[in-house]
Image (spheres, rainbow, N blue to C red):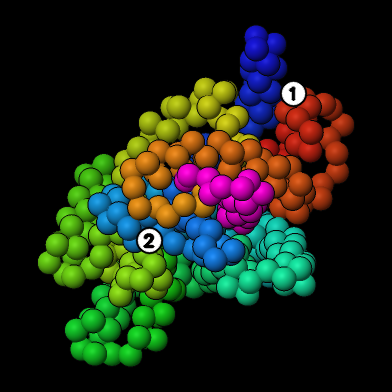
Amino acid sequence: MRELRARWSALAAGIDAATPAGRDRAVDALRALAILGVVLGHWLVTSLTATDGGLHGTSPLAHLPWLAPVSWVFQTLAVFFLVGGHVAALGYASARERGVSYGAWVRQRLGRLFRPVAAVLVLSTVVAGGMLIGGAELDTVRTLVRLVLSPLWFLLVFAALTAATPLVARLSPLWPAAVVAGVDLWRFQLGGPEWIGWINVAAGWLVPFTLGAAWARGALARRGRLRLRLLAGVGAAATAALILWGGYPASMVGVPGAAVSNLNPPTLAAVAFGLAQCGLALLVRDRLARLMRRPVAWAKVALVNLSAMTVFLWHQTAMMAVTALGLLVSVDLPGLHTVPDSVGWIAARVLWLPVFAAALGLCRAAFRIHEQARRPRPATVTAASRVPGTSAKEITHA
Protein backbone atom coordinates (compact mmCIF):
# COMPACT_ATOMS: atom_id res chain seq x y z
CA MET A 1 0.00 0.00 0.00
CA ARG A 2 2.82 2.38 0.85
CA GLU A 3 4.51 1.65 -2.48
CA LEU A 4 1.23 2.28 -4.32
CA ARG A 5 0.82 5.64 -2.60
CA ALA A 6 4.38 6.57 -3.47
CA ARG A 7 3.82 5.72 -7.14
CA TRP A 8 0.58 7.70 -7.20
CA SER A 9 2.32 10.69 -5.60
CA ALA A 10 5.07 10.48 -8.21
CA LEU A 11 2.48 10.30 -10.99
CA ALA A 12 0.59 13.28 -9.58
CA ALA A 13 3.81 15.28 -9.33
CA GLY A 14 4.61 14.47 -12.96
CA ILE A 15 1.17 15.55 -14.15
CA ASP A 16 1.42 18.74 -12.11
CA ALA A 17 4.83 19.54 -13.57
CA ALA A 18 3.64 18.84 -17.13
CA THR A 19 0.66 21.20 -16.85
CA PRO A 20 1.18 24.64 -18.43
CA ALA A 21 1.42 27.39 -15.83
CA GLY A 22 -1.36 29.43 -17.42
CA ARG A 23 -3.95 26.63 -17.50
CA ASP A 24 -7.16 27.43 -15.62
CA ARG A 25 -7.43 24.30 -13.51
CA ALA A 26 -10.71 25.37 -11.94
CA VAL A 27 -12.38 25.13 -15.36
CA ASP A 28 -11.18 21.54 -15.67
CA ALA A 29 -12.43 20.82 -12.15
CA LEU A 30 -15.90 22.12 -13.00
CA ARG A 31 -15.98 20.02 -16.18
CA ALA A 32 -14.94 16.89 -14.26
CA LEU A 33 -17.55 17.50 -11.56
CA ALA A 34 -20.24 17.99 -14.21
CA ILE A 35 -19.36 14.75 -16.01
CA LEU A 36 -19.15 12.73 -12.79
CA GLY A 37 -22.45 14.21 -11.61
CA VAL A 38 -24.21 12.98 -14.76
CA VAL A 39 -22.59 9.54 -14.50
CA LEU A 40 -23.51 9.03 -10.84
CA GLY A 41 -26.98 10.43 -11.44
CA HIS A 42 -27.67 7.94 -14.22
CA TRP A 43 -26.36 5.06 -12.15
CA LEU A 44 -28.60 6.03 -9.24
CA VAL A 45 -31.87 6.83 -11.02
CA THR A 46 -31.75 4.34 -13.92
CA SER A 47 -32.84 0.80 -13.20
CA LEU A 48 -33.20 -2.29 -15.37
CA THR A 49 -35.67 -4.76 -13.90
CA ALA A 50 -35.73 -8.42 -14.87
CA THR A 51 -39.31 -9.29 -15.83
CA ASP A 52 -40.71 -11.94 -18.17
CA GLY A 53 -37.23 -13.10 -19.10
CA GLY A 54 -36.06 -9.67 -20.27
CA LEU A 55 -34.81 -6.29 -19.05
CA HIS A 56 -37.06 -3.24 -18.85
CA GLY A 57 -36.11 0.31 -17.88
CA THR A 58 -37.59 2.12 -14.92
CA SER A 59 -36.49 4.62 -12.27
CA PRO A 60 -36.67 4.87 -8.49
CA LEU A 61 -38.03 8.38 -9.03
CA ALA A 62 -41.19 6.82 -10.47
CA HIS A 63 -41.72 4.73 -7.33
CA LEU A 64 -40.23 7.05 -4.69
CA PRO A 65 -41.11 10.66 -5.62
CA TRP A 66 -39.48 11.98 -2.44
CA LEU A 67 -36.13 11.15 -4.07
CA ALA A 68 -36.52 14.14 -6.43
CA PRO A 69 -33.83 16.17 -4.55
CA VAL A 70 -31.28 13.58 -5.72
CA SER A 71 -31.76 14.96 -9.24
CA TRP A 72 -30.92 18.45 -7.95
CA VAL A 73 -27.45 17.22 -6.98
CA PHE A 74 -26.60 15.07 -9.98
CA GLN A 75 -28.26 16.87 -12.91
CA THR A 76 -25.17 18.94 -13.73
CA LEU A 77 -25.47 19.41 -17.49
CA ALA A 78 -25.87 23.18 -17.14
CA VAL A 79 -22.39 23.38 -15.60
CA PHE A 80 -20.99 21.37 -18.50
CA PHE A 81 -22.54 23.77 -21.02
CA LEU A 82 -21.27 26.71 -18.95
CA VAL A 83 -17.72 25.37 -19.17
CA GLY A 84 -18.24 24.48 -22.83
CA GLY A 85 -19.28 28.02 -23.72
CA HIS A 86 -16.35 29.45 -21.75
CA VAL A 87 -13.78 27.18 -23.42
CA ALA A 88 -15.27 27.56 -26.91
CA ALA A 89 -15.31 31.37 -26.71
CA LEU A 90 -11.73 31.52 -25.46
CA GLY A 91 -10.58 28.95 -28.01
CA TYR A 92 -12.18 30.72 -30.95
CA ALA A 93 -10.77 34.09 -29.89
CA SER A 94 -7.32 32.52 -29.58
CA ALA A 95 -7.66 30.88 -32.99
CA ARG A 96 -8.53 34.20 -34.61
CA GLU A 97 -5.51 35.85 -33.01
CA ARG A 98 -3.29 33.10 -34.40
CA GLY A 99 -4.83 33.37 -37.86
CA VAL A 100 -6.50 29.94 -37.70
CA SER A 101 -9.58 29.71 -39.91
CA TYR A 102 -13.02 28.96 -38.53
CA GLY A 103 -13.11 25.68 -40.46
CA ALA A 104 -9.84 24.45 -39.00
CA TRP A 105 -10.89 25.51 -35.50
CA VAL A 106 -14.30 23.84 -35.61
CA ARG A 107 -12.87 20.62 -37.08
CA GLN A 108 -10.39 20.41 -34.23
CA ARG A 109 -13.07 21.16 -31.61
CA LEU A 110 -15.63 18.71 -32.96
CA GLY A 111 -13.12 16.00 -33.81
CA ARG A 112 -12.54 15.11 -30.18
CA LEU A 113 -16.29 15.06 -29.54
CA PHE A 114 -17.16 12.69 -32.37
CA ARG A 115 -14.15 10.35 -32.58
CA PRO A 116 -15.35 8.24 -29.62
CA VAL A 117 -18.88 8.00 -31.03
CA ALA A 118 -17.90 5.65 -33.86
CA ALA A 119 -16.77 2.95 -31.42
CA VAL A 120 -20.03 3.23 -29.46
CA LEU A 121 -22.16 2.96 -32.59
CA VAL A 122 -20.23 0.01 -34.02
CA LEU A 123 -20.21 -2.01 -30.80
CA SER A 124 -23.87 -1.31 -29.97
CA THR A 125 -24.90 -2.34 -33.49
CA VAL A 126 -22.96 -5.59 -33.31
CA VAL A 127 -24.20 -6.46 -29.82
CA ALA A 128 -27.83 -5.58 -30.62
CA GLY A 129 -27.71 -7.69 -33.77
CA GLY A 130 -26.15 -10.59 -31.88
CA MET A 131 -28.82 -10.40 -29.17
CA LEU A 132 -31.64 -10.45 -31.73
CA ILE A 133 -30.10 -13.38 -33.57
CA GLY A 134 -29.68 -15.15 -30.23
CA GLY A 135 -33.38 -14.83 -29.48
CA ALA A 136 -33.43 -11.87 -27.06
CA GLU A 137 -36.71 -10.02 -26.66
CA LEU A 138 -37.11 -7.02 -28.94
CA ASP A 139 -38.20 -4.87 -25.98
CA THR A 140 -35.03 -5.82 -24.10
CA VAL A 141 -32.79 -4.93 -27.04
CA ARG A 142 -34.69 -1.68 -27.60
CA THR A 143 -34.29 -0.72 -23.93
CA LEU A 144 -30.56 -1.40 -23.93
CA VAL A 145 -29.91 0.39 -27.23
CA ARG A 146 -31.91 3.41 -26.05
CA LEU A 147 -29.77 3.65 -22.91
CA VAL A 148 -26.53 3.28 -24.87
CA LEU A 149 -27.48 5.95 -27.39
CA SER A 150 -29.20 8.35 -24.98
CA PRO A 151 -26.01 10.38 -24.33
CA LEU A 152 -25.76 11.20 -28.03
CA TRP A 153 -28.54 13.81 -27.95
CA PHE A 154 -26.42 15.82 -25.53
CA LEU A 155 -23.39 15.47 -27.78
CA LEU A 156 -25.28 16.68 -30.84
CA VAL A 157 -26.63 19.75 -29.05
CA PHE A 158 -23.23 20.53 -27.56
CA ALA A 159 -21.57 20.17 -30.97
CA ALA A 160 -24.14 22.45 -32.63
CA LEU A 161 -23.64 25.18 -30.03
CA THR A 162 -19.86 24.84 -30.27
CA ALA A 163 -20.00 25.21 -34.05
CA ALA A 164 -22.22 28.29 -33.60
CA THR A 165 -19.78 29.96 -31.18
CA PRO A 166 -18.94 32.87 -33.53
CA LEU A 167 -22.67 33.70 -33.77
CA VAL A 168 -23.68 33.26 -30.13
CA ALA A 169 -20.55 34.21 -28.18
CA ARG A 170 -21.86 37.72 -27.47
CA LEU A 171 -25.52 36.81 -27.15
CA SER A 172 -27.06 37.67 -23.78
CA PRO A 173 -28.39 34.59 -21.92
CA LEU A 174 -31.62 36.54 -21.38
CA TRP A 175 -32.61 36.08 -25.04
CA PRO A 176 -32.64 32.26 -25.14
CA ALA A 177 -34.19 32.26 -21.63
CA ALA A 178 -37.01 34.41 -22.99
CA VAL A 179 -37.50 31.93 -25.84
CA VAL A 180 -37.80 29.07 -23.34
CA ALA A 181 -40.36 31.04 -21.32
CA GLY A 182 -42.38 31.82 -24.44
CA VAL A 183 -42.35 28.21 -25.61
CA ASP A 184 -43.45 26.96 -22.19
CA LEU A 185 -46.24 29.52 -22.08
CA TRP A 186 -47.42 28.36 -25.49
CA ARG A 187 -47.18 24.65 -24.58
CA PHE A 188 -48.64 24.63 -21.10
CA GLN A 189 -51.00 27.64 -20.94
CA LEU A 190 -52.13 28.38 -24.49
CA GLY A 191 -52.62 24.83 -25.75
CA GLY A 192 -49.78 24.88 -28.25
CA PRO A 193 -48.55 21.66 -29.91
CA GLU A 194 -46.15 19.43 -28.00
CA TRP A 195 -43.57 19.52 -30.78
CA ILE A 196 -42.97 23.22 -30.17
CA GLY A 197 -41.20 22.23 -26.96
CA TRP A 198 -38.25 20.90 -28.95
CA ILE A 199 -37.20 24.47 -29.69
CA ASN A 200 -36.07 24.48 -26.07
CA VAL A 201 -33.48 21.79 -26.73
CA ALA A 202 -31.37 24.47 -28.39
CA ALA A 203 -32.64 27.52 -26.51
CA GLY A 204 -32.49 25.91 -23.07
CA TRP A 205 -28.85 24.83 -23.30
CA LEU A 206 -27.92 28.04 -25.08
CA VAL A 207 -28.57 29.86 -21.78
CA PRO A 208 -25.62 28.34 -19.82
CA PHE A 209 -23.50 28.20 -22.99
CA THR A 210 -23.81 31.96 -23.58
CA LEU A 211 -23.29 32.54 -19.86
CA GLY A 212 -19.99 30.70 -20.22
CA ALA A 213 -19.08 32.90 -23.19
CA ALA A 214 -19.88 35.98 -21.08
CA TRP A 215 -17.58 34.60 -18.40
CA ALA A 216 -14.84 34.18 -21.01
CA ARG A 217 -14.99 37.83 -22.09
CA GLY A 218 -14.97 39.07 -18.49
CA ALA A 219 -18.58 40.26 -18.37
CA LEU A 220 -19.22 38.43 -15.09
CA ALA A 221 -16.20 40.01 -13.40
CA ARG A 222 -17.94 43.35 -13.15
CA ARG A 223 -19.52 43.66 -9.70
CA GLY A 224 -17.91 40.28 -9.02
CA ARG A 225 -19.38 38.00 -6.44
CA LEU A 226 -22.46 40.12 -5.84
CA ARG A 227 -23.67 39.41 -9.36
CA LEU A 228 -22.93 35.69 -8.97
CA ARG A 229 -24.80 35.51 -5.67
CA LEU A 230 -27.73 37.26 -7.33
CA LEU A 231 -27.61 34.78 -10.22
CA ALA A 232 -27.61 31.78 -7.89
CA GLY A 233 -30.26 33.23 -5.58
CA VAL A 234 -32.68 34.35 -8.28
CA GLY A 235 -32.24 31.07 -10.14
CA ALA A 236 -32.98 29.05 -7.00
CA ALA A 237 -35.97 31.21 -6.06
CA ALA A 238 -37.40 31.01 -9.59
CA THR A 239 -36.97 27.23 -9.62
CA ALA A 240 -38.79 26.89 -6.29
CA ALA A 241 -41.63 29.15 -7.45
CA LEU A 242 -42.06 27.26 -10.72
CA ILE A 243 -42.22 23.92 -8.89
CA LEU A 244 -44.50 25.09 -6.07
CA TRP A 245 -46.90 27.30 -8.03
CA GLY A 246 -46.13 26.84 -11.72
CA GLY A 247 -46.99 23.17 -12.00
CA TYR A 248 -43.51 22.01 -13.02
CA PRO A 249 -42.27 18.63 -11.69
CA ALA A 250 -39.77 18.64 -8.82
CA SER A 251 -37.40 16.21 -10.53
CA MET A 252 -34.81 17.81 -12.80
CA VAL A 253 -34.54 14.61 -14.87
CA GLY A 254 -37.17 12.70 -16.77
CA VAL A 255 -39.35 10.27 -14.80
CA PRO A 256 -40.93 7.31 -16.65
CA GLY A 257 -44.68 7.78 -16.91
CA ALA A 258 -44.65 11.46 -15.89
CA ALA A 259 -46.76 13.85 -17.96
CA VAL A 260 -44.02 16.51 -18.10
CA SER A 261 -40.23 16.18 -18.10
CA ASN A 262 -38.03 19.10 -17.06
CA LEU A 263 -35.19 17.77 -19.18
CA ASN A 264 -36.62 16.31 -22.35
CA PRO A 265 -37.12 18.96 -23.66
CA PRO A 266 -35.76 21.52 -21.16
CA THR A 267 -38.37 23.63 -19.42
CA LEU A 268 -38.18 27.06 -17.82
CA ALA A 269 -37.75 25.30 -14.46
CA ALA A 270 -34.70 23.44 -15.79
CA VAL A 271 -33.24 26.70 -17.13
CA ALA A 272 -33.78 28.50 -13.81
CA PHE A 273 -32.24 25.57 -11.97
CA GLY A 274 -29.28 25.60 -14.37
CA LEU A 275 -28.70 29.30 -13.75
CA ALA A 276 -28.64 28.65 -10.00
CA GLN A 277 -26.12 25.85 -10.55
CA CYS A 278 -23.95 28.04 -12.78
CA GLY A 279 -23.98 30.87 -10.24
CA LEU A 280 -22.91 28.45 -7.50
CA ALA A 281 -20.22 26.93 -9.73
CA LEU A 282 -18.74 30.35 -10.45
CA LEU A 283 -18.88 31.27 -6.77
CA VAL A 284 -16.78 28.24 -5.79
CA ARG A 285 -14.34 28.70 -8.68
CA ASP A 286 -11.68 30.44 -6.58
CA ARG A 287 -11.86 27.73 -3.94
CA LEU A 288 -11.50 25.06 -6.63
CA ALA A 289 -8.51 26.90 -8.06
CA ARG A 290 -6.78 26.76 -4.68
CA LEU A 291 -7.60 23.06 -4.32
CA MET A 292 -6.23 22.33 -7.78
CA ARG A 293 -2.81 23.62 -6.71
CA ARG A 294 -2.42 20.34 -4.85
CA PRO A 295 -0.81 17.85 -7.26
CA VAL A 296 -2.86 14.86 -6.08
CA ALA A 297 -6.19 16.67 -6.47
CA TRP A 298 -5.18 18.08 -9.85
CA ALA A 299 -4.02 14.68 -11.14
CA LYS A 300 -7.46 13.18 -10.50
CA VAL A 301 -9.18 16.02 -12.35
CA ALA A 302 -6.71 15.90 -15.25
CA LEU A 303 -7.21 12.16 -15.74
CA VAL A 304 -11.00 12.56 -15.79
CA ASN A 305 -10.76 15.35 -18.36
CA LEU A 306 -8.40 13.29 -20.48
CA SER A 307 -11.22 10.79 -21.10
CA ALA A 308 -14.28 12.93 -20.42
CA MET A 309 -16.17 11.93 -23.58
CA THR A 310 -15.21 8.28 -23.22
CA VAL A 311 -16.51 8.24 -19.64
CA PHE A 312 -19.70 10.00 -20.70
CA LEU A 313 -20.41 7.77 -23.69
CA TRP A 314 -19.65 4.45 -22.02
CA HIS A 315 -21.01 4.84 -18.48
CA GLN A 316 -24.43 3.48 -19.38
CA THR A 317 -22.83 0.55 -21.18
CA ALA A 318 -20.78 -0.24 -18.08
CA MET A 319 -23.92 -0.32 -15.93
CA MET A 320 -25.77 -2.49 -18.44
CA ALA A 321 -22.86 -4.92 -18.75
CA VAL A 322 -22.84 -5.48 -14.99
CA THR A 323 -26.63 -5.87 -14.99
CA ALA A 324 -26.54 -8.38 -17.85
CA LEU A 325 -23.76 -10.44 -16.25
CA GLY A 326 -25.80 -10.49 -13.06
CA LEU A 327 -28.53 -12.38 -14.93
CA LEU A 328 -26.22 -15.40 -14.90
CA VAL A 329 -27.09 -15.74 -11.21
CA SER A 330 -30.25 -17.74 -10.62
CA VAL A 331 -31.89 -15.08 -8.42
CA ASP A 332 -32.64 -11.41 -8.97
CA LEU A 333 -29.88 -9.35 -7.37
CA PRO A 334 -31.10 -6.53 -5.07
CA GLY A 335 -30.33 -3.08 -6.44
CA LEU A 336 -29.57 -4.53 -9.85
CA HIS A 337 -32.60 -6.43 -11.16
CA THR A 338 -35.26 -5.73 -8.53
CA VAL A 339 -37.95 -3.05 -8.68
CA PRO A 340 -36.59 0.25 -7.27
CA ASP A 341 -39.42 0.89 -4.83
CA SER A 342 -37.79 0.85 -1.39
CA VAL A 343 -35.00 2.30 0.72
CA GLY A 344 -33.43 -1.16 0.63
CA TRP A 345 -33.06 -0.87 -3.15
CA ILE A 346 -31.29 2.47 -2.74
CA ALA A 347 -28.84 1.01 -0.21
CA ALA A 348 -28.16 -1.97 -2.48
CA ARG A 349 -27.68 0.26 -5.53
CA VAL A 350 -25.06 2.35 -3.68
CA LEU A 351 -23.12 -0.88 -3.06
CA TRP A 352 -23.15 -1.58 -6.81
CA LEU A 353 -21.60 1.78 -7.71
CA PRO A 354 -17.96 0.59 -7.26
CA VAL A 355 -18.73 -2.36 -9.55
CA PHE A 356 -20.13 -0.02 -12.19
CA ALA A 357 -17.02 2.16 -11.78
CA ALA A 358 -14.74 -0.85 -12.31
CA ALA A 359 -16.62 -1.78 -15.48
CA LEU A 360 -16.36 1.81 -16.68
CA GLY A 361 -12.63 1.70 -15.98
CA LEU A 362 -12.36 -1.28 -18.35
CA CYS A 363 -14.34 0.61 -20.99
CA ARG A 364 -12.08 3.62 -20.55
CA ALA A 365 -8.96 1.50 -20.95
CA ALA A 366 -10.34 -0.13 -24.11
CA PHE A 367 -11.82 2.90 -25.86
CA ARG A 368 -10.10 6.08 -24.67
CA ILE A 369 -7.69 5.84 -27.62
CA HIS A 370 -10.53 7.05 -29.86
CA GLU A 371 -10.77 10.31 -27.92
CA GLN A 372 -7.14 11.36 -28.26
CA ALA A 373 -5.72 12.94 -31.37
CA ARG A 374 -2.59 11.28 -32.66
CA ARG A 375 0.49 13.12 -31.54
CA PRO A 376 4.17 12.30 -31.78
CA ARG A 377 5.57 10.63 -28.71
CA PRO A 378 7.50 12.94 -26.41
CA ALA A 379 11.23 12.42 -26.36
CA THR A 380 11.41 12.46 -22.58
CA VAL A 381 9.54 10.17 -20.22
CA THR A 382 7.85 11.68 -17.22
CA ALA A 383 5.96 10.18 -14.32
CA ALA A 384 2.72 10.80 -16.19
CA SER A 385 3.83 8.78 -19.21
CA ARG A 386 4.36 5.72 -17.05
CA VAL A 387 0.59 5.23 -16.91
CA PRO A 388 -0.24 2.78 -19.71
CA GLY A 389 -1.71 4.68 -22.66
CA THR A 390 -1.25 8.09 -21.01
CA SER A 391 1.33 10.76 -21.73
CA ALA A 392 2.00 14.02 -19.97
CA LYS A 393 1.48 15.81 -23.27
CA GLU A 394 -1.98 14.31 -23.58
CA ILE A 395 -2.84 15.45 -20.08
CA THR A 396 -1.90 19.02 -20.87
CA HIS A 397 -4.37 18.90 -23.78
CA ALA A 398 -7.19 17.35 -21.72
The secondary structure type at the circle numbered 2 is loop
Q: Residue at x 59, y 51 (%)?
A: 323
Range of magenta residues: 307-335
**As displayed, is residue 271 above or below residue 390?**
below
**As displayed, is residue 31 above or below residue 134?**
above
Q: Which residue position holds label 1?
A: 383
Q: Residue at x 36, y 80 (%)?
A: 197
Q: Which residue position holds label 2?
A: 253
| Residue 317 shown in magenta | yes
In the rendered image, is residue 64 in sight? yes
Q: Quadrant of the N terminus?
A: top right
The secondary structure type at the circle numbered 1 is loop
Q: Quadrant of residue 59?
A: bottom left
Left or right position of 223 against 14: left
**Residue contact between numbered discs 1 and 2, judged by CB atoms under 8 Å:** no
Marker count (numbered): 2
Q: Position of residue 51 (x, y in %)?
A: 52, 62
Q: Quadrant of residue 288?
A: top left
**Residues at marks 1 and 2, CA–CA distance in whole angstroms:** 41 Å
Q: Position of residue 371 (x, y in %)?
A: 71, 52
The front one of 145 and 367 is: 145
Q: Position of residue 71 (x, y in %)?
A: 35, 52
Count neighbours of disc 2 (C-alpha within 10 A) and say few if under 14, some if 14 to 19, many if 20 or more. Answer: many
The front one of 56 and 61 is: 56
Q: Amino acid at mark 2?
A: Val
Nearer to us of marks 1 and 2 is 2
Left or right position of 162 against 120: left
Q: Amino acid at mark 1?
A: Ala
Q: Residue at x 74, y 23 (%)?
A: 383
Count neighbours of disc 1 (C-alpha within 10 A) and say few if under 14, some if 14 to 19, many if 20 or more. Answer: many
The front one of 121 and 295 is: 121
In the rendered image, is residue 170 in sight? no
